Image: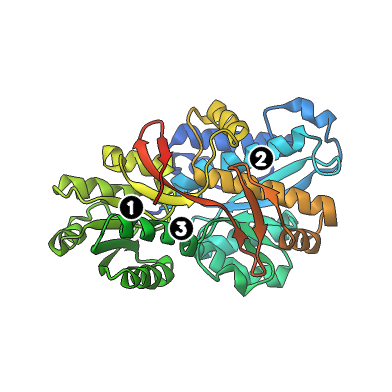
């Protein structure tokens, strides 16, 4: 995610990929090989691994879903962490008998995290693999794919957090807490702790177009003096921007973006430059492994608001994820896990078609999230989810505690 953009590894249903692509996958080669093997073997068998016994329970013609996630480029590291959660969800659906007796099968395509790759990946899974629904991610990817949802009549669902984005199409859905629901929790905390000067860091991508004015408006409501800086994804030295922040003498620093390691590096360099200013995250991105590793100990004490993560409620996913990868899933893994079950329920109710799945997703109500709490879909295709405020206490495990604003 941090290095220069490189050629994408191409996951194919027939388990064919370029021999030279694998070394370019970044940053965790062992994890990449596991994803490739799992996707390919599962595709050949028509089910997702590892529990082959489920084929006796879900033995009908497989129902195929598309997954257009970045597996390379600046967003690739996180994509590689989320694909296993999607696979585990399909695994659990199949263990329970599949969808009306049909196992779920996934076709994974590397979107590369950019508009061009997003369009190419979507065309492939729709026109070649004939999928009736797609799981996807990231604002710039979803923005590029939305016109195709209407053209192909194929719904997409993602954990994007851009307000109003999925409202552009009745075929687009999002399952995630919006900044408009997570930022007020932080604002209440700032009010209670008498924060008067706030400096924010956003990436210079479309996410800043809504994050910047939303944060500025929230600060103005509280009488907080506000300043911000935009950083470039993929950079490794943010000390010039941090020097600006230091001269501003903030009482609090907000870091909000796509959850890339860049944000963790900013946290680390803030501490290296001698700033002890409290840091905040308006999503739970600091729970992401690649993010925590880039931040190191600088992430300890960060206060973040985001998707409710009830450890006990999420135990089934957490245990399976830890068994596969050796560490706990982040908050977005809970969201994408939910999405697979939402699609499965839509198929059960209205059939294995784009229109049927679209209708089922639009009607999501009182859905029990793996993270705890009930979820519903609003009229614009955005899920309404429970959120909470947390403080990171251990960057390695990770461990965090829920706090009051």
C-alpha span from label 2 to label 1 = 31 Å
The residue where tag 1 is placed is 280
Residue 84 x, y percent position in the rendering: 58, 39
Total labels drawn = 3
Percent of width and height locating residue 372: 60, 43
Whole-percent x and y of residue 297? 27, 37
Q: Is residue 144 at least partly visible in the picture?
A: yes
SS at mark 1?
strand
User: Which residue lies at the image location 78% right of the left edge and 34% below the top edge?
Assistant: 96
User: In the structure shown, which secondary structural element does the residue marked by tag 3 occupy?
Assistant: helix
Please state which of residues 297 and 51 is positioned toward the viewer in this rendering: 297
On residue 98, the disc is none
Identify the element where label 2 is drawn.
helix
Pointer 3 residue = 182
Residue with the mark numbered 2: 89
Mark closer to the observer (2, 1): 1
Q: Residue at x 41, y 38 (%)?
A: 400
Which of disc 3 and disc 1 is earlier in sequence? 3
**Side of 263 where 142 appears, left or right:** right
């Amino acid at each position: 995610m941090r290095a220069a953009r490189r050629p994408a590894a191409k996951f194919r249903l027939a388990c064919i990929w370029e021999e030279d692509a694998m070394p370019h996958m970044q940053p965790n080669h062992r994890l990449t090989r596991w994803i490739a093997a799992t996707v390919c073997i599962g595709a050949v068998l028509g089910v997702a691994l590892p529990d082959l016994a489920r084929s006796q329970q879900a033995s009908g013609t497989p129902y195929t879903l598309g997954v257009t996630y970045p597996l390379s480029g600046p967003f690739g590291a996180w994509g590689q962490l989320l694909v296993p959660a999607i696979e585990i969800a399909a695994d659990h659906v199949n263990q329970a008998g599949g969808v009306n007796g049909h196992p779920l099968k996934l076709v994974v395509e590397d979107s590369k995290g950019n508009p061009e790759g997003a369009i190419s990946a979507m065309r492939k899974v729709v026109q070649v693999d004939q999928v009736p629904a797609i799981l996807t991610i990231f604002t710039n990817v979803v923005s590029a794919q939305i016109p195709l949802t209407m053209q192909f009549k194929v719904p997409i669902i993602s954990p994007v957090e851009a307000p109003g984005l999925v409202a552009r199409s009745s075929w687009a859905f999002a399952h995630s807490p919006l900044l408009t629901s997570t930022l007020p929790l932080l604002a209440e905390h700032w009010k209670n702790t008498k924060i008067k000067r706030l400096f924010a860091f956003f990436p210079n991508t479309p996410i800043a177009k809504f994050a910047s004015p939303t944060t500025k408006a929230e600060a103005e409501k509280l009488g907080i003096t506000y300043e911000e800086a935009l950083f470039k994804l993929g950079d490794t030295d943010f000390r010039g921007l941090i020097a600006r922040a230091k001269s501003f003498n903030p009482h609090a620093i907000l870091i909000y973006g796509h959850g890339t390691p860049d944000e963790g590096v900013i946290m680390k360099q803030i501490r290296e430059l001698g700033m002890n200013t409290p840091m905040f995250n308006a999503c739970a991105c600091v729970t992401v492994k690649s993010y925590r590793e880039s931040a190191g100990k600088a992430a300890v004490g960060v206060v973040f608001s985001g998707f409710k993560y009830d450890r006990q409620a999420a135990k089934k996913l957490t245990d399976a994820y830890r068994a596969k990868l050796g560490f706990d899933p982040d908050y977005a893994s809970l969201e994408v896990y939910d999405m697979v079950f939402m699609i499965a329920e839509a198929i059960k109710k209205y059939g294995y078609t784009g229109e049927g799945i679209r209708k089922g997703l639009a009607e999501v109500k009182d859905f029990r999230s793996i993270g705890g709490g009930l979820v519903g879909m609003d009229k614009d295709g955005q899920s309404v989810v429970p959120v909470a405020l947390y403080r990171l206490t251990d960057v390695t495990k990770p461990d965090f505690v829920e706090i009051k604003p």
